[in-house]
Amino acid sequence: MTVLVVGSVALDSVETPFGKADEVIGGSGTFFAASASHFTKVQLVGVVGSDYPFHKLDPLRARGVDLAGVERAEGESFRWRGRYRHDLNSAETLETRLGVFSQFRPKIPDAFKKAPFVFLANIDPRLQLDVLKQVEKPQLVACDTMNFWIESRRSDLIALLKHVDVLLLNDAEARQLTEHNNLVKAARWILERGPKHVVIKKGENGAFMFTANTVFFAPAYPLEDVFDPTGAGDSFAGGFIGYLARAGKLDETHLRRAVVHGSVMGSFAVERFSIQRLMEIGETDIRSRLEDFRRLVAFEEELTA
Amino acid sequence: MTVLVVGSVALDSVETPFGKADEVIGGSGTFFAASASHFTKVQLVGVVGSDYPFHKLDPLRARGVDLAGVERAEGESFRWRGRYRHDLNSAETLETRLGVFSQFRPKIPDAFKKAPFVFLANIDPRLQLDVLKQVEKPQLVACDTMNFWIESRRSDLIALLKHVDVLLLNDAEARQLTEHNNLVKAARWILERGPKHVVIKKGENGAFMFTANTVFFAPAYPLEDVFDPTGAGDSFAGGFIGYLARAGKLDETHLRRAVVHGSVMGSFAVERFSIQRLMEIGETDIRSRLEDFRRLVAFEEELTA
């Protein structure tokens, strides 16, 4: 089944202890689409400026991502410049230039309005709500957010939650949103406000998925070389929703497997700059890492390792 | 099979956001013994001062912990005073009074020298090595350490590693010891220096176990109320070694299950002050939490949750 994603399409300049990348393609919509495209058809809605090297999105198109919803507006593209220090855990933002993204009003093309799966990547909750008004009864609505919106658009975000099936956010955001330090309590707070599932991502420390009466945990795959963490969260979301859209099932078992697929896709994303690694890998790589992942957490059957 | 543990037997005074405890029993040897006693016979070697309320160790004795190796020396007992802030992740040490522990020279009673499983809790690596000289060919030697010894007794610690089968330490200690920020690299560094297994504990973020060609991860059980984190690491070690001693098998499968048992026992320890919760629980509680744990990470079979 098709996934519609609405998010940013940006140009990232990133410094890590391992190298530098200048003006490479990035943005939440881009990473999500690159990841989800391994599982299903993706429709991307976003905006770029007149200076955007649009041909750099060709690999996405080649993977079946429909770019008809990526508007080209007069002006500068969204640019983010950041740096990761030695521990790679948190990005230091050196510069954010919103450009045309500051005036972004998502217009969902008619051909996209029936998408059964919708992912609202991290944009203003008012725009996220507006997207939901434009689409026709999706089977699953998932959304992400960030500290900026939790602070500046708190009531809009809480209003949005009523219409969201799965909220994905990181642990710091969950704590900030709910004012609970304990993640079990934070999850319950969120589940009382609309979502049936909440996925709390903890970066290199894995991810929890909570429902009203279950909890699931998947670690992050332990990589020897994390090259650039940018986009890991959106790639996680792409694997999560992409897998569900392919499976077409939304029961607990498939949602758990979706978290594992999210973790696997996040682990690929961080192995290179931009969406490079996500564009290199194929089904065999994904299946092989899923198997590595299964071994990583297996303790019930007899092992011969 | 019997487990010999050599460690501290202390009096802790702890403040958490949920309450205060004054001069309750603590220490690495005590927590380890309390936890491991659920699985097997434990022999405890340590030292207390003449002021120690020795009868407070009666619950340990009642659970089959042999206290014949706990020496009573003239002077003050080891006291630790600490505080946990809201996030409960790191203890702030307010006061450490080593007392008789500063002169501790472990003397292994003859009756303990044949213990097939030995746990060297966090003491001076020179004393840990000295313990190994006193015992007779144990099947498994596991040891813990801390930042203080990594700094002040680095070469002794590295010399000790040659005689250790399993090193248990936390992520900060692993990074400090190996000077690798990446835990996969840190683990390899350690595995090259003696231990066949290294368990890297990450507190509320779970634990990794590495061997030369495998890696296993177990999350920490997500509790809604973490009351007092003191002793979680030693209780983890008690569950880990205790389970192995009961199983009597040291293959990869049993070592993985041992990590899960460690995680389960750590999760009980933090539910009350001191060893209180570890003394309350029984086999049914442990089995029930193991089942919760299995559900926490299960994603392969069809679930009906």
Image (spheres, coloured by chain):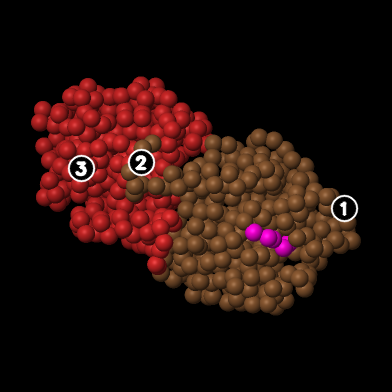
Chain colours: A brown, B red
In x, y percent, where is residue B93?
A: 38, 45
Q: Amino acid at mark 1?
A: Asp
Name above or below for residue B262 compared with residue A182. above
In x, y percent, where is residue B33?
A: 21, 44
Q: Left or right: A99 with respect to A300?
A: right
Residue A178 inside the magenta-drawn segment: no
Between circles 1 and 3, the one closer to the viewer is 3
Q: Quadrant of residue B97?
A: top left
Q: Quadrant of residue B295?
A: bottom left
Tag 3, which secondary structure?
A: helix
Q: Are marks 1 and 3 on the same chain?
A: no
Q: Mark 3 touching mark 2, by CB under 8 A?
A: no
Q: Residue at x 55, y 62 (%)?
A: A247
In the picture, which quadrant includes the C terminus of chain B? bottom left
Circle 1 sits on which residue?
A51
Between marks 3 and 2, how big is the CA–CA gap? 19 Å
Q: Are marks 3 and 2 on the same chain?
A: no
Circle 2 sits on which residue?
A303
Between marks 1 and 3, how big is the CA–CA gap? 67 Å
Q: Chain of mark 1?
A: A
In x, y percent, where is residue A228?
A: 64, 43
